Image (cartoon, coloured by chain):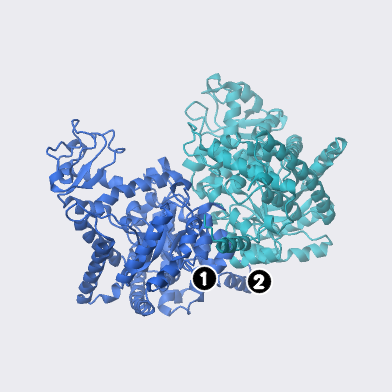
Chain colours: A blue, B cyan
Amino acid sequence: MASDAGYMKRREELIALDRALRADHIRDPLSPTEAKADNVIRELRTKEASTIWNADYPSIPHPFPGMEFLTGRSIIEKTKIFKILSKMPKGAILHSHFDAMGNPAEILKLVLEQSAMHVCCSSPLNSSNLKSILPKFKCLPPEEYPKETVSLTDDNYTCNSWISANSAREMFDPELGGPGGFDRWVIAAMTINPTEAYGTHNTIKKIWQKLATTFHLYEPMIHYEPIIREYFRQIILSAIEDGISYLEIRMNLPYRCLANDCKRFLSDHEIFRIIDHVLNDIKAELKQQGREDEFIGAKVIIATLRWISMENLEERLQNCITLKKEFPHLVAGFDLVGHEDDADQGYPLSHYAEMLLKFPEMQKKAGVDEIPFIFHAGETFGDGTKADGNLYDAILLGTKRIGHGFSLLKHPKLMEICRERDIAIEVCPISNEVLRLTSSINSHPVPALFNHGLRVALSSDDPSMWGCMGLTYDFYQVLVSSELTGIIQLGEVAKDSIKYSMLSSEEKERALLAWQRRWERFLEYVLRVGQELEIKPVDQMI
Amino acid sequence: MASDAGYMKRREELIALDRALRADHIRDPLSPTEAKADNVIRELRTKEASTIWNADYPSIPHPFPGMEFLTGRSIIEKTKIFKILSKMPKGAILHSHFDAMGNPAEILKLVLEQSAMHVCCSSPLNSSNLKSILPKFKCLPPEEYPKETVSLTDDNYTCNSWISANSAREMFDPELGGPGGFDRWVIAAMTINPTEAYGTHNTIKKIWQKLATTFHLYEPMIHYEPIIREYFRQIILSAIEDGISYLEIRMNLPYRCLANDCKRFLSDHEIFRIIDHVLNDIKAELKQQGREDEFIGAKVIIATLRWISMENLEERLQNCITLKKEFPHLVAGFDLVGHEDDADQGYPLSHYAEMLLKFPEMQKKAGVDEIPFIFHAGETFGDGTKADGNLYDAILLGTKRIGHGFSLLKHPKLMEICRERDIAIEVCPISNEVLRLTSSINSHPVPALFNHGLRVALSSDDPSMWGCMGLTYDFYQVLVSSELTGIIQLGEVAKDSIKYSMLSSEEKERALLAWQRRWERFLEYVLRVGQELEIKPVDQMI
């Protein structure tokens, strides 16, 4: 190492200038506990990189920290860092979609409890077509229950004929695994597997087609009154379990959810009542258990698909206002969703700009508080494409945050505006990787966003599909694919997820105080793990 | 599309501000010919994206523009855009390595012309080991020629025993393809194939191991006096053929090149004499043919490996000064090379900083003109790693350009410094992709560098290994993986490669004038192609 003291000083100054915009640099100096905990995580990361990540795994040819998530998940789960992060208070989830947040196995359990739930498929199942034929679910009213039941695995099964989900499971050919085989068949269809993401569907277009298929499968499983309540409850409880204390969930309206009688759809009003009840119940339960710090609440970002007609958009905006009037505490904002990159699958934001520009005026007329736009934009590796161009419109239309912003780094002026106007970026690392915008987290733009002083909230997008409910996996990938980012930066990201949420100032204050208390307990826990592993505390270092 | 005129105006203004730093925006307004040619290329790109890139190829499961180069090369070569770009005047190659710039088949031909050239391998070759056993070449003085010759494909072949390269070829088992099979065996070992890059060696560490193996194979094939002259000549002629008019080539010294007698190594002085002669010959030939505009010359960036001792570095720096004194027109700068990312494979720049800081003083003492540093730095997707940190040292040590700078985007302050101090980035898109820093050019940082106003020279690095001699392939990948970058931006990149070269101001002026003349002829050619293809000229567009 150069012993020229002048040079080394200039070098340090330059590095400090270069990192001056990072959240972990502009914050208060580290407390002694923070400094020690930071050191424990850095040492452990280095150690695990050369042990767990450097070992031989028969089914994983090229393990490395930050690697393709679906292949590397089993290694991630072996690490101490993963275990530690699972206990970290993570603030808020600000970007995930209502139908894609549940544990697939738990959803299937809920489905099997309902006698109304039926299933069909396009061909009798056998060992050679089991991987390619998908299940389809539907709730039927009692008078439409099928008269006879032939197993899906019976050669005599009539294609696309409905049979009770429970019978289908019970009668599933033992050769194909019996009831357990049925479960595996359904769950496989509910998730994206490594062969699909990194092999058969290894382009953005193809993997999105797979994703769309998966969403279509979930819809009838979840959109049923007796299920949705329990489904939503499970989402919230498992988020709390993962250290998440607040959620803003995108929900596409109209949310065609069948009522108990399977004969009509619930109104948006009824859906929001269910959401409200579930949240109030959970809050009351936690209060009873003295765990109020762990959960602040949840809100909905009302979304609609980016290919609807202009008239329908107007109706959706009106409807959003109506819901805001009735559930002011539940409506967080408005968004348009869908595969931005696929020209056949919808319009860019600019297409709707004129109508969207009217939204503030519509709100004022209705006398509701401001409903912000929180737009998806730039979920693309394109340069100068329509999806990339959505970033301009999102910002011109006054978006409060940017969903994804994967291509934001290509836009110097927009980066400046995001910093000036405090527009945070909802970054979904694992989603971006599985959906083939990046081959590993190491090539993901998130470290550059950190370094350029953009404020980031890490999020999970559609965790059901990649089997990583909660935020621990996303935090893990970001932590191990950088040597610069440590637990302090992740702490700032967690705090930012609260700061840049649509909570009121009072709620934010309460949430941040609660987060701080949990953060300090978490750091103590990290130090205990460090001691157990005999990691040298930082003050004994050089 | 939004019909709100005010909004659309604000949108245009924002886009203009966002792109204000791009080379194609800060230049003079387009000439009518430029505008039309730009349109032809854009229309053609759109058309080919939905035709050639959207067709079915049995051996290419997921074609798309910008895809993995080694898999997509055969599609690239089918496109009209590729044909057009092959005729574009591309300015200079500023980043490529002497031993890795030749066409492997041509190198093998040169090798087979030399009776001194011998070959061996570690096991008799057969159909099952042919793909895994590598050839090894060596020049022998006549008295060491082997007494008997057993074919490499004969079971009785003694492992690692030298036989004449020509005999080895002639005697190659017809079952294994005979002489043609020998050629294919050697050439396969000289190149990285798609299965290696995207399968068996699909991590940075593994693909670099493969790259190192390949370099070791080339060395004895090229480092022989009767070959190097013709090899260098071919490199230059094929570059000229590809529209390249100037080269700065990194050459590792000491360049252990065997003299004609195979008994001693040529001195650096002798090597530089050969280089000088070849360049003078080519210039004279072109002058005779009235083609002076096509070639300005070539210089050497003297390099040494980043794991040498401090004493050796001092000696190398002295030696560089000596060569500069004798060949002032040939020495362009000094660099340290090797796999930055691999801690076992050398030191970061900071390790050598103290010694490197002395270089200007050493030069002054010797009375030579300034020899600039032109450092490799940031050839990594790491964040805060030593390789990433090399960017700080390169800049602090006053580098004139940055080789690769793949991780530069993570450094806001360094980007600012590069803009202020006019430090250009030598970007090697295909190299970065094959060496697994990015999965496709679509995820490569080059569009972001353009948009942030960094000045870029596209280069090919080790084109022998990926079979893409010249710059056409790299230009192609950058053009088709963006909708923003057009032929005008590529023209600016070509000009920049001259501007940011180490040519003298007079040479630069001459080179730029020559480039401009060729550019105008090229644009006319693009318009003719556009007419043939019946692409609407831009002034007929809305």
Q: Nearer the viewer, residue B530 or A298?
A: B530
Query: Relative to B220, is B123 on the left or the right?
Result: left
Find residue B468 and report its horizontal and vertical position in percent.
63, 39
Q: Do tags 1 and 2 sit on the same chain?
A: yes
Q: Is residue A262 visible?
A: yes
* Residues at marks 1 and 2, CA–CA distance in whole angstroms: 24 Å
Find residue B194 and report its horizontal and vertical position in percent.
52, 38
Residue closest to the far right: B288
Q: Residue at x 35, y 77 (%)?
A: A507
Disc 2 marks a residue whose amino acid type is Tyr
Name the front one of labels 1 and 2: 1
Q: Which numbered dot is residue A169?
A: none
Q: Residue at x 32, y 54 (%)?
A: A464
Q: Is residue A136 above or below residue B351?
A: above
Q: Quadrant of residue A297?
A: bottom left
Q: Earlier in the sequence, mark 1 or mark 2?
A: 2
Q: Chain of mark 1?
A: A
Q: Which residue is mark 2?
A: A7
Find residue B22 and report its horizontal and vertical position in percent.
66, 58
Q: Which residue is mark 1?
A: A22
